Image (cartoon, rainbow, N blue to C red):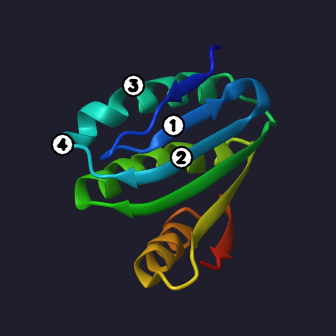
Amino acid sequence: MDNLFIAATATSPEIDFRFDQNVLALRGESYPENAAAFYAPVMEALNAWLAGCAQAEITVEVTLTYFNSSSTKMLFSLFDALDRAACAGNRVAVNWYRDEEDEMILEFGEELQTDFTAIQFNDCPVAT
């Protein structure tokens, strides 16, 4: 399967899914005008790739500095797909990078940990 790269814009994050290396990265800010439309091809590619994964070690690098409520819904869909993959026997580790002062991003990461228990979450505070 081909890797997926979408360059960041002022309102959407960089998507760098290196399927050939089992590394998925999201970086930047996420508040596109239509989050469902932005994330639809991302979810389609992710779900297609995950369908072929068996006993894979998947690393997810998340460095989002801001996301709005519609992006939050799409992120939950993304983590739900990863959680299902983990329940199916894949090892999924999420490195959650955040500004050490950013309580909102910290709390969202903690909420993800609570909701998606099959995924290993690593809180990675970064000093600014």
Q: Nearer the viewer, mark 3 or mark 4?
A: 4
Quarter location, residue 42: top left
Question: Between disc 2 and disc 4, whose residue precedes?
Answer: 2
Query: Residue drawn 35% across and 51% down?
Result: 30
Q: Nearer the viewer, residue 23 or 13?
A: 13
Q: Is 44 placed above or below 60 here?
A: above
Mark 4, residue position: 33
Q: Residues within 10 Å of mark 2 (few under 14, many from 20)?
A: many
Question: Between disc 3 and disc 4, whose residue precedes?
Answer: 4
Q: Nearer the viewer, residue 15 or 51?
A: 15
Instruction: Give me the C-alpha separation between circle 4 and circle 1.
Output: 17 Å
- The kind of residue on which mark 4 rests is Glu
Quarter of the picture containing the N terminus is top right
Q: Is 106 placed above or below 84 here?
A: below
Question: Between disc 3 and disc 2, whose residue precedes?
Answer: 2
In the rendered image, residue 45, in percent from the top left (x then y), is placed at 50, 24
